Image (cartoon, rainbow, N blue to C red):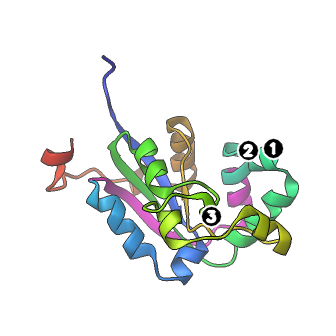
Amino acid sequence: MAKTELEQTLIVFKPDALQRGLVGEILTRFERVGLRIVGTKMLAPDSKHYFTHYEDIGKLKTRAGENIFDITLEMMGEGPVIAMVLEGVESVALVRKMVGGTEPKSSQPGTIRGDFSHMSYAYADNKKKGIPNLIHASGDPAEAAQEIAHWFAAPELFDYEALHEKFTR
């Protein structure tokens, strides 16, 4: 049997999550399942930072085209974001499951996007706007490692023992 390790994953609360006042409610969901916050900061990245995040690491322009890429960068520039590193058992897959699909309309009830957002790709395309889907979550452990290194310096990540860890690890 393969050994299961603790993982770290990046989440970014997008401008729409901050503007709608949903950060606390969303963060509570992650804490309740036993994920531990090991790094957090509020910032307003420039387009170069987002280019590295969305294309150099995430390959968004390569996968979805320049128009989607440009709309995403424009939307991300609409306000500050909160970046966090969460740690836990298989945290990347857990967070992805909790966040739901990229398209809010098709996200299942009970997921963050399914509960707090609703826009479809078709509506966004028709309006030529980005989809306000509240949160970015790393796609896989390798991507998480790259994203964390891009958003956080090593001294910005902390190790401590949370009280509930005897129940979740």
Residue at 60%, 70% in the rendered image: 118
Q: Amino acid at mark 3?
A: Lys
What's the mark number on residue 59?
A: 2
Where disc 2 sits, the SS reads loop
Give the class, few, some or many, for how many residues have Cα within 10 Å of label 2's Cα (few <14, many ≥20): some
Give the class, few, some or many, for how many residues have Cα within 10 Å of label 1's Cα (few <14, many ≥20): few
Q: Amino acid at mark 1?
A: Thr
Q: Kindly tell me whether residue 107 is visible in this rendering.
A: yes
Q: Is residue 19 magenta?
A: no
Q: CA distance from mark 2 to mark 1?
A: 5 Å
- Mark 1 touching mark 3, by CB under 8 A? no
User: Residue 96 at what x, y percent from top left?
Assistant: 49, 49
Q: Nearer the viewer, mark 1 or mark 3?
A: 3
Q: CA distance from mark 1 to mark 3?
A: 24 Å
What's the mark number on residue 39?
A: none
User: Residue 103 at what x, y percent from top left?
Assistant: 64, 59
- Mark 2 touching mark 1, by CB under 8 A? yes
Residue at 56%, 68% in the rendered image: 134
Q: Where is mark 3, residue-wise?
A: 105
Where disc 3 sits, the SS reads helix
Sequence-first disc among 1 and 3: 1
For residue 1, which quarter of the picture? Answer: top left
**Which residues, given as a range, are shown in magenta?**
34-52
User: Residue 148 at what x, y percent from top left?
Assistant: 51, 49
Q: Amino acid at mark 2?
A: Lys
